[in-house]
Amino acid sequence: MYGKKYKWIAVAGIFAMILTATASFAANRDFDKAETIRIGSLGPVQLVPGIGIHNAAQMAVEEINAAGGIHGKKLELFIGDTEGKPEKGITAMKKLVLEDKVDVLVGCYSSGVALALQPYLPRYQIVYIASGTASIALTDNVKKDYKKYRYFFRDMINSDVRQQQWATKFLTEFVNGKLGYTKFAILAENTKWVQEYGPNLKKDLEDAGLEVVFYEMFDIDIKDFAPTFVKIKSAGAQWVAQIVSHAASIPLVKAWQDTKPAPMGLCNVASMDSNFWDMTGGKCQGEITYNFIARAPLTDKTIPMWDKYVAQFGTNPVYTTGFTYDSVYMLAEVIKQKKSLKSDDIIDGLENISYKGVLHPEIGFDKESHDLLEGRYVMPMVQWQADGKQVVVWPEQFKTGDYVPPAW
């Protein structure tokens, strides 16, 4: 009786070891024997940033295949729906790696989801370029434990330092320096990616001699923003700096337009989508948000890619789109150069790449943290104007039109 029991335990243990071994090496196939190159795209299929990820990956894969693939091998795209939730993200990733046998991963919206996925990368020995997650904790993990987390790269601008620094630059140089406003309200959602961003932005504005007359980190479940904007108006704010990604953007913008507290501009992820004009009934007119990509000459590839994307998908690229598109192309270039699907070869290739993409002419990664190299990014500030037109108003070298104050 006991002998049978231990026999089954031993068999179960061996079976578990086999599963682990299979999982670990699923992403390190022999390039010469591979019939196709398998790309896994992670993102919530119900949300604008996730749609932007999957559309961009599809577009890049189709273009690469049309150009002959990689040494004659076609790319296959597999979609993983994270639903924007850590536990769903883990399930989606496991399916891509263990069932679909993808060679590399791109995408992901939500730093919380990416942080949940990150520990699985060394387990599966699979390279992953995150193209929609901003928390600096992700690349700090690589720097702290390179051996474990070297599989992770981020083609995206971290929020804790770089987005916040760019926000400070916009508010001090443009809003204060050009428009002359000195009193600010900061209205930020209380989520992982904003935990350092919000407080640091407030400090930077105050250090610059400007007043932050209203500061609030609000719960993402809030739907009625009218009372908040009434408070902002009463505080005498001349400019509202919104930091919104996961919260209810439509009610927020409608309440802003209805209460008319002050001009508003900084970051609203949902407002990056061209459909946001119709979603708000045009009440986003006057609002500004950065978008990382715009129909502007960021490189000579940007406008052609933008126009093709609009023609193919009926909407404009959003912030995750450009990063994902460039990420797929970088992975393809490295695999082509190395003629290898081995993760160590792909990592070496990405650590040494300088790629001209749609977002920057020299995209590259820091070898210690695998974050974007400093200065290899831009964050165009885009304003909604009459008839749903999206206009880059800053920085000067990428302007497509002038800032127009809200009509009120």
Image (cartoon, grey):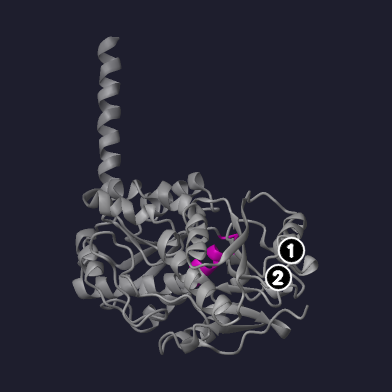
Badge 2 is on which residue?
Answer: 262
Residue 316 shows in the view: no
Q: In this view, does 277 lie above or below 223?
A: below
Q: Looking at the image, do the residues carrying marks 1 and 2 touch, with CB atoms under 8 Å apart?
A: yes
Choose between 70 and 108: the one closer to the eye.
108
Q: Where is residue 385 in the image (x, y as percent from the top left)?
A: 68, 83
Which residue is drawn at the image coordinates 71% and 77% (left, top)?
285
Q: Residues within 10 Å of mark 1 (few under 14, many from 20)?
A: many
- Disc ID at residue 233: 1
- How much space separates mark 1 and mark 2, taking CA atoms? 7 Å
Give the label on residue 314, or none: none
Q: What type is the residue that disc 2 sits on?
A: Ala
Viewport quadrant of the N terminus: top left
Q: Which residue is drawn at 63% across and 51% down?
A: 220
Front residue of 260 and 13? 260
Which residue is more in the foreground, 40 or 190? 190
Q: Can you tell which quarter of the image residue 241 is in?
A: bottom right
Q: Earlier in the sequence, mark 1 or mark 2?
A: 1
